[in-house]
Image (cartoon, rainbow, N blue to C red):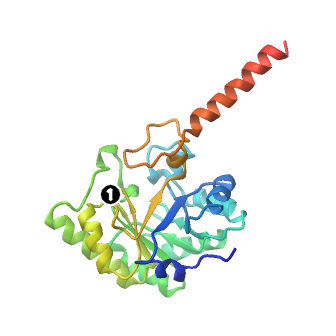
Amino acid sequence: MNKISVEKIIKLKNTSKITMITAYDFVSGHIVNNSDAEMILVGDSLGMTTLGYEFTNSVKLDDIIRATQSIARVGISKLLVADLPYKTYETNESALSNALMLIDAGADAVKLEGGKEKSQIINFLVQNNIQVMGHIGIKPQSVNNISDYKIVGKNKSEEDNLFEDAKRIELSGAFSVVLELVDSKLSKNISENISIPTIGISSGKYTDGQVQVYNDLIGYSPNILPKHAKVFDNLFEKAQNAIDSFVKETKSKYK
């Protein structure tokens, strides 16, 4: 299978809905790579799904590097995007150094959070041949309270700021932008007025694509899943049942 490129992702805008799914290890990478999704995101959401943290801002660069390396070993045909974790892209120099480590680990592109305030850093990375995906709306690395997860862009001030963020990210050379918990009407307006694909999560149906968390999709978590999660199975319960069955069999059969 041919490797999906950034150019192909851009061409899909206005022609076909784009899907991006997170993965955190060899097995999840293998499963998502066998799907029809176009992109795999090594998300810092691994902090909650895999490492037991409460928020993403506890994730370190080494965590993302190891996850990226394990997924790359699958032989990925999708576009592999890796998150730059919290505080790893404060300056041009740190952003480039850390992005290069993710590229060396197997990523095709990096994602970073922030709008106009990060546009110069995005442009610097692009000028140094790093493909960048932006991320605006709710920025999980800045969240320290679960109550902060709420729709943004409902009032004129937020709407204007987010629209400007999206335009600045586009002009900075990013190939796409994630819209997280952005009002549906605003997501539609942004998607229709920038040339790069918008990838939504709980931002309505009008974005050019959607991203979801692997563990949420398959129902593989001991935690209460977010309201915006798409859940298609309950593998956590199935796994628990399988483990319990083994323990029960062993204790009854091998007395």
Instruction: Report the amino acid beneath label 1.
Output: Leu
Number of numbered discs: 1
Say above or below: 147 vs 171. above
Which sits in the foreground, 160 or 114?
160
Label 1: state its secondary structure. Answer: loop
The quarter in which the N terminus is drawn is bottom right
Relative horizontal placement of residue 96, taking residue 67 as reference (left or right): left
Q: Determine the residue located farthest toward the left in the rendered image.
A: 156
Q: Determine the residue located farthest toward the top in the rendered image.
A: 255
Which sits in the foreground, 65 or 45?
45
Say above or below: 200 vs 236. below
Which sits in the foreground, 203 or 222?
203
Q: At 32% from the left edge and 60% from the top edge, which residue is drawn? A: 204
Q: Determine the residue located farthest toward the bottom in the rendered image.
A: 127
Q: Visible in this render: residue 116?
A: no
User: Dot 1 corresponds to which residue?
Assistant: 181
Residue 86 place in picture, x, y as percent: 45, 60
Location of residue 29 (image quadrant): bottom right
Say above or below: 4 vs 137. below
Relative horizontal placement of residue 71, taking residue 11 as reference (left or right): right
Q: Visible in this render: residue 212?
A: yes
Relative horizontal placement of residue 31, taking residue 117 as reference (left or right): right
Location of residue 203 (image quadrant): bottom left
The quarter in which the C terminus is drawn is top right
Residue 231 place in picture, x, y as percent: 48, 45
Residue 44 place in picture, x, y as percent: 50, 56
Q: Determine the residue located farthest toward the front in the rendered image.
A: 15
Residue 42 place in picture, x, y as percent: 56, 61
Q: At 29% from the left edge and 80% from the top edge, which residue is drawn? A: 193
